[in-house]
Image (tube, grey):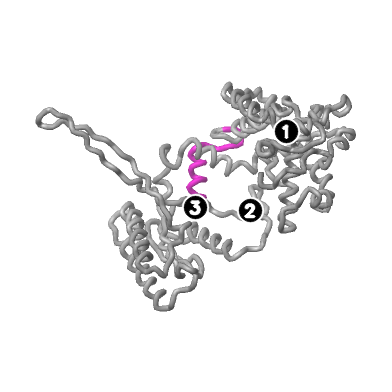
Amino acid sequence: MKKINRFAAAALSFALATTMAGCNAPGAITFGNGTKNALTVDGYDVPAGVFINNEISAYRSAMYTVALTNGSVPTFDDMKDAKIDDMDAEDWIQDQATDTCKLFVAIEKEFDKINGELTQEEKDEIKAYLKTVSDNELFSNNGISAESMRLTVENSYKQDYLFNHYFGIDSEMGCTEEELKDYFEENTARVKYVSVKMTDADGEALSEDAKRELNKKIDAWIKEINSESSNADKMAKVDEIQTEYDEYVAAQTTLAADAELTTTTTTTTTAATTTTGENGETETTTTTTADPYANEVTVTKYTTTESDGTETEETTETEADKAQREFNEKVFGDLPLYEAVKYDYDDDTVYILIKGDIAERMTEDDLWTEDKIDEVLKQRYNQDFSDWLEGIANSYSVEKNNSAYKRYAPFKLDIEDVSLYG
């Protein structure tokens, strides 16, 4: 749990709050002079409201951890008696909230260090958001002031600013756009597939004769695809095969299409062309063009290590997980470009599978948009950024206000109605 993305803690707590307007508290928490600040981090006084907000978020993380361990969602009373990492839940929650406060201070200090400044648009967004949650009882009942709310939301924007400053394109710890493209292309594949089910509509296995018939059809369809003269025609042919298979399934009433993997959406663009006829009158012709990439999917390469090179935690692999992992290994392994193959996904499913060249779609109006660049930067550097910021935060001295920690202990807060699912 130490690697939980605590940078999202503030946003998580605020998102949670918007779903909880009806908490039943005996009265709102008020701060005394001795508990106005919950802790001091490297000389920075952290307001109690910021700490409490982080406790609420940590409480939800604790609920999630206990639910994973016990196999069921815990109640408020369950949480009081729970242990996490051999710690009482209350201590675990306050430790997590303390760590998040350290990160809060690290963001504030680093933002000031580089003379960061939010844009007017960002300031307006913060103001508008705070207005939407200003009357939420989760905040008022737990003594989280408007100022603490503002500080918390602003801090999340400053976090994004720091990420872009240090890990953005051409930044100190980032990379060039070409290097990021290379990273994306190495870790992303574009594929098309037809999912052929070897079961009937009730999920029962087909007879051996029916399976042989389907396998013959699959072999013939693959031959059709690979006989096309161009790569674009091969990819387009997969759509035709999909239609043929759907028609076959409909005709065979004993089969059922895999709704998740065979339902596709074709995006079309319509262009109007105006011409002048011989009599001088204008005529408008409408042409509809199908999106050639509409039925493609992108697949991200699985990784078994963290960015620091350590192995990820091993978990029990289900049959479904195994099928997905082996499919991923196939896509990024020996699967050639633009050559359709037969692939046994699991005992019940056979794919007609083809991979395209991802580089062909790396344009600003297709896969390489500004939003995609931001997404890939986060994918590549989020752990590095997390480690960098945690390194700074962990170097700070911390002085806890014991009176505040006792007064605002998590199970004294009005959080009994907090839901794991929001």
Q: Position of residue 115 (x, y in %)?
A: 66, 22
The residue tagged 1 is: 137
The residue tagged 2 is: 305
Q: Nearer the viewer, mark 1 or mark 2?
A: 1
379 to the left or right of 142: left
* Tag 1: amino acid: Glu
Which circle marks residue 299 in the picture? 3
* Tag 3: amino acid: Val
Q: Quadrant of residue 221?
A: bottom left
Q: CA distance from mark 3 to mark 1?
A: 43 Å
Q: Which residues are magenta?
A: 171-187
Which circle marks residue 274 in the picture? none
Q: Quadrant of residue 138?
A: top right
- Marked residue nearer the N-terminal end (2 or 3): 3
* Tag 2: amino acid: Thr
Taking depth in this image into account, of 7 and 253 the one nearest to the observer is: 253
Badge 3, how many Cα within 10 Å: few under 14, some, many 20+? some
